[in-house]
Image (cartoon, helix red, strand yellow):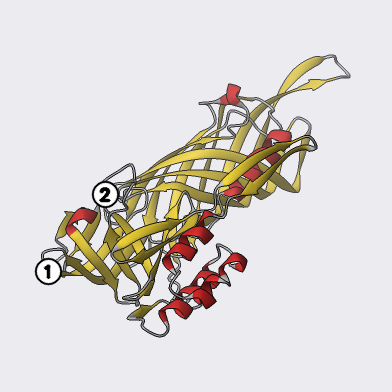
Amino acid sequence: MRRTILFTCIMLCCITSIIAQIQSENGKVVFRTGQVLIGKINYFLDQPSDIIIYDSNGVKSVFTPNQVRQIILDNGKKFLSKTLIGHQDSSALIFQILIESPKISLFVRDENDNKQFYVLKDNVIYDLVNNEQIIKTNDGTYKSYDKKYIGTLKSLMSDQTEIVKRLDKIRLYEDELVEVITAYDRGNITYFWQLNNKLTREPYWAVFGQFIGYGSYEAGQKCLFPSYGFITGFQYYFSRTSRHSLKFTIGYSDYNLTDYNSLIGQNYSYNEKDISIGCRYQYDIVRANKYSVYIMMHITDVSYYIDTNPKENGFTVWPRLSPGFGFEAKLFKHVALYAELNNILYLSYIPKSFSVGLKYDLCKTNW
């Protein structure tokens, strides 16, 4: 149980919004040569070197951020390709533009599922960081932050002393950074992405079916071979760019189990068949153009069971809380094949606890 709680906490830490990922969005790409290409644009944070464009005829082209100057989507979002001086990689990075101005511009990127903010002045880009520091004293050890971003902003805004005086109270939050940057720019803004601008969310569904091999039943109870199941259902993504999804399932399971009978003082075997409906959560750790790697949590099942020994049947609710890992290969435009390791907290049952399945995306656009 402790291992399940720990794994659940790790998964909850992963639940964050995604910044700067583009998936099958209509728009245009402006190249450094001045050329403009219009079509459906894909840019995956986990595949940062590829900007993929499908033109009106469905022809695919792949470019690097070094070739691109800007990406402008039909929904109003704009992205800039820029090399960050001092970055360990000299290749250009893709930044979402929040404020564009001849004075100071504000950008944001998703880095390890956290918002990282940047400012641009005089064609030089600076990252706004708040480094964690561990301070040891006679009274103990505690954490502090150097608030380096405040020093950076003070240096860049030194020509406006009334704003510099306010900066010590500025936190590294999007709304507060937008407020101070707009105040400094004094209306000289060529583009502004409103913080609360409500885009039309485009959630989508997929249908799937899978075979399951069971190595354990619950709480680590070992399954005998053969123990298997089939499930089918719908997978709901909160948006096309979301890494989060829920699976709603209906399935059939056939368990061959062993247990200890204290009355006769020996183990005995029995069979249980379940018909169930359930819910599972999935978070895509890596989401690229042709594949995904994800963690998942089998949350709960409502089951009708039939036991052979003792003979009984009835309905029950099983809080499964069973975590796992999966890999999904996107084979065709709407079709994906996936494989999973289930119930990974009980390592002795791997690879007996596994799944293989097929998924079909119901969204009108491709993956």
Label 1: element kind = loop
Q: Is residue 274 visible?
A: no
Horizontal relation, residue 170 to residue 67: left or right: right
In depth, the one of 194 and 281 nearer the eye is 194
Query: Callout 1: 10 Å neighbours few (<14), some, many (20+)?
Result: few
Q: Is residue 11 above or below residue 43?
A: above
The quadrant the C terminus occupies is bottom left
Q: What kind of residue is marked 2?
A: Ser
Q: What kind of residue is marked 1?
A: Gly
Image quadrant in which you'd find residue 107? bottom left
State the image coordinates of residue 122 (x, y, percent, origin top left).
30, 66
- Look at 59% across and 64% down and name the residue there: 171
Q: Is residue 16 visible?
A: yes
Q: Which mark is nearer the camera, 1 or 2? A: 1
User: How far apart are the two marked residues, 1 and 2, measured between alpha carbons?
Assistant: 20 Å
Picture disc at residue 34: 1
State the image coordinates of residue 343 (x, y, percent, origin top left).
59, 34
- Look at 60% across and 49% down and name the residue there: 13
In depth, the one of 220 and 70 nearer the eye is 70
Tell which circle, 1 or 2, labels the residue nearer the N-terminal end.
1
Label 2: element kind = loop
| Circle 2 residue | 49
- Look at 33% across and 42% down and name the residue there: 88
